[in-house]
Image (cartoon, rainbow, N blue to C red):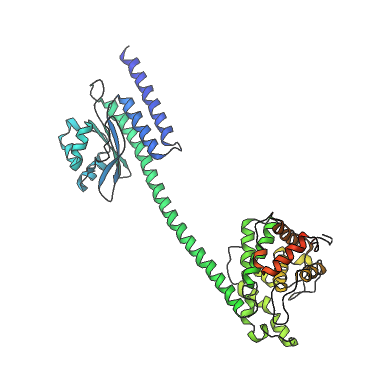
Amino acid sequence: MNDVTYGLERLLFNLDTLAELGEELTSPKDFNKIVKSSLYMIMGNFSAFKGAIFQFDHGKKTAKPIASKGIGDINDCVIKLEEETIKELVALKTPIDISSNKKATSFLGVGKTGLEKIKVRILAPLVVREDLLGLIAIGEKFSGEVYSKDDFRLLSVIAHHIAVSLHNQSLLRKLMGKYDENKKLYENLICIYYDTIHAFATAIDAKDAYTKGHSHRVSAYCAAIANEMKWSQDETEGIRIAGLLHDIGKIAIDKSIINKDRPLTNNEFVELNSHPVIGYEILSKVKFPWTGIPKMVRNHHERVDGRGYPDSLGSNEISLGSKIMTVADSFDAMTTDRPYRPSLTPDEVIMELKKNYNKQFDRDVLHNFFSIIRKEIVGENKPAIMPFLSSSFADELKTKVLNRTINLFSFEK
């Protein structure tokens, strides 16, 4: 084989190696496996029988092995580098022949013994943008041949590819660290956000001695209906929050009016019925991550027949969220004691809801609400409403539905 043919074959072989290396370094495999495969390619290309790749730790000023072949366990082989040595390696940027470069022995530091075990012949710094990222160390060739200038040039190109990969991996690791840090901060903020909303809901309910937990129950009922109506997770979370805050306007209402156990005067009615507007004014100044919360709160006492308050809206003008909240709010009012009356029986509650379908309540919302109750009673759904009811009410409702004494769907959908 003449020199030209050999040179051409060698060039093609080197190009093939670089192509394989590029494919390997950009593969989605585990990074340590990528580094190990890269080392095997290097050693195979140069027919070297020992080798290792080291990653440099800027904080400790040490290089530790992350892949090796032909030298057993070298995890304890740590190369300590002085600041001046680091600068020299960065400035060098090309492989060096340890055997012929006496100054190079200063690079070994406390890792000299370990590197002697490898019988390092060539040391290639891994540098990107004046930043030392690691080292490639390879031993003698099987054939005993010396490394040629072409070998050094090829190793220099390979080292650059691996250095870029190490650089990208380092950036990714830092990015993931920042991501985890920001994720924890975000989760903490979300917790604070939810705690604040729950605190508001508790403060609202505290004004009414008879409705402790009312806002939390309405919130749960709203979310259950939204789920039944196939709302998205984000939309469902929005109405859950709106349910917690639907009575926030009552903070501005005199407590004596809220807890009055006798009929209200006209002026007292006007003041009490102003709470949706007050709630809207409060919440419209808040930038919620969910849409429609202020409007749902303002319109939760509207009726589909247009006789609700505060705006006497028609059915088409009322959002579905407000219609859901109307059913949830009314159901909780009927199933709990109030200053002016005790809670209703299951028969009375179902009768009242049916009597007001297409008047106070939207028929589709009411149909879905009854569907939830039926599914929970027969065990098709995870309980979302029944656990909030008194045990006596829940037991009676369950018995009557199962015995068909109460027919939830005996009205036109």
- For the N terminus, the image quarter is top left
64 on left or right of 15? left
- Residue shown at the point (26%, 26%) measured from the top left: 149
Task: Kindly identify the residue that appears in the image at 36 percent across and 25 percent down.
Answer: 14
- On the image, the x and y values in percent for residue 182 come to 45, 58
Residue 236: give x, y in percent of width and height.
64, 60
Left or right of 200 on screen, residue 153: left
Query: Which quadrant, please, contains the C terminus?
Result: bottom right
Q: How many marks?
A: 0
Evaluate whether residue 213 shows in this view. yes
Residue 135 horizontal side relative to residue 304, left or right: left
Between 182 and 382, the one nearer to me in the picture? 382
- From the viewer's side, name the closer residue of 400 and 382: 400
Q: Does 49 appear above or below 342? A: above
Please indicate whether residue 28 sits to the left or right of residue 364 in the image. left
Res 373 quadrant in image: bottom right
Residue occupying the far top of the picture = 1
Q: Is residue 294 above or below residue 175?
A: below
Residue 131 against residue 52 in the figure, above or below: below
- Which image quarter: residue 100? top left
Place of residue 388 in the rendered image (x, y in percent of width and height, measured from the top left): 65, 67
**Residue 293, can we see it?**
no
Q: Is 105 placed above or below 289 here?
A: above
Question: Foreground: 410 or 27?
Answer: 410
**x and y percent of residue 338 in the render?**
70, 79
The quarter holding residue 96 reads top left
